[in-house]
Image (cartoon, rainbow, N blue to C red):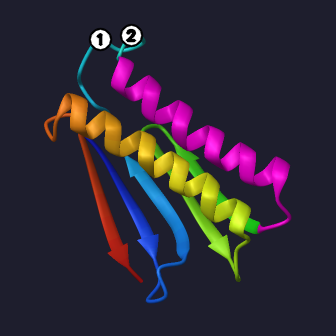
Amino acid sequence: MITITVYKNEDQQYEGFLSEGHAGYGTEGSDIICAAVSVLTVNAINSIEKFTADRFAVRQDDGLLELVLEGVISKETSLLLDSMVLGLMDIQKNYGNEYIKLIFEEV
């Protein structure tokens, strides 16, 4: 199962996210849930880097991707992460909690 924890502060501003695990929906290399989650999370990070001046750190390993935002973030970054979360919620809705779990945590 892929677990994505989205971190927000008490003002509901994004602080980052952590994606861990593998969906186990299909065979390695053809798992559409893993592929969809990867596209959404990596594209969000790439878009933040390309289209904003916001600072962040990324940690990546097999089955792990973490984004840690630094300081106050722009409206653009917030919108990009809203879009990522929308896509992840849709995957969870369509494929169920057996393969993907989305958690929101206040930090």
Residue 55, above or below 61: below
Left or right, residue 86 beside residue 31: right
Q: Which residue is mark 1?
A: 27
Q: Position of residue 103 (x, y in %)?
A: 29, 61
Q: CA distance from mark 1 to mark 2?
A: 6 Å
Left or right, residue 27 beside residue 73: left
- Residue 21 can be seen, yes or no: no
Residue 44 is covered by the magenta coloring: yes
Q: Which residue is mark 2?
A: 30
**Quadrant for the C terminus in the image:** bottom left
- How packed mark 2 is, by other alpha carbons closer than 10 Å (few <14, some 14-19, many 20 or more), is few
Q: Nearer the viewer, residue 22 or 91?
A: 91
Q: What range of the chain is rendered magenta?
A: 32-54
Left or right, residue 68 beside residue 20: right
The kind of residue on which mark 2 rests is Ser
Label ID, residue 42 = none
The kind of residue on which mark 1 rests is Thr
Q: Are marks 1 and 2 in contact (CB under 8 Å)?
A: yes
- Residue 55 can be seen, yes or no: yes
Residue 67, above or below 22: below
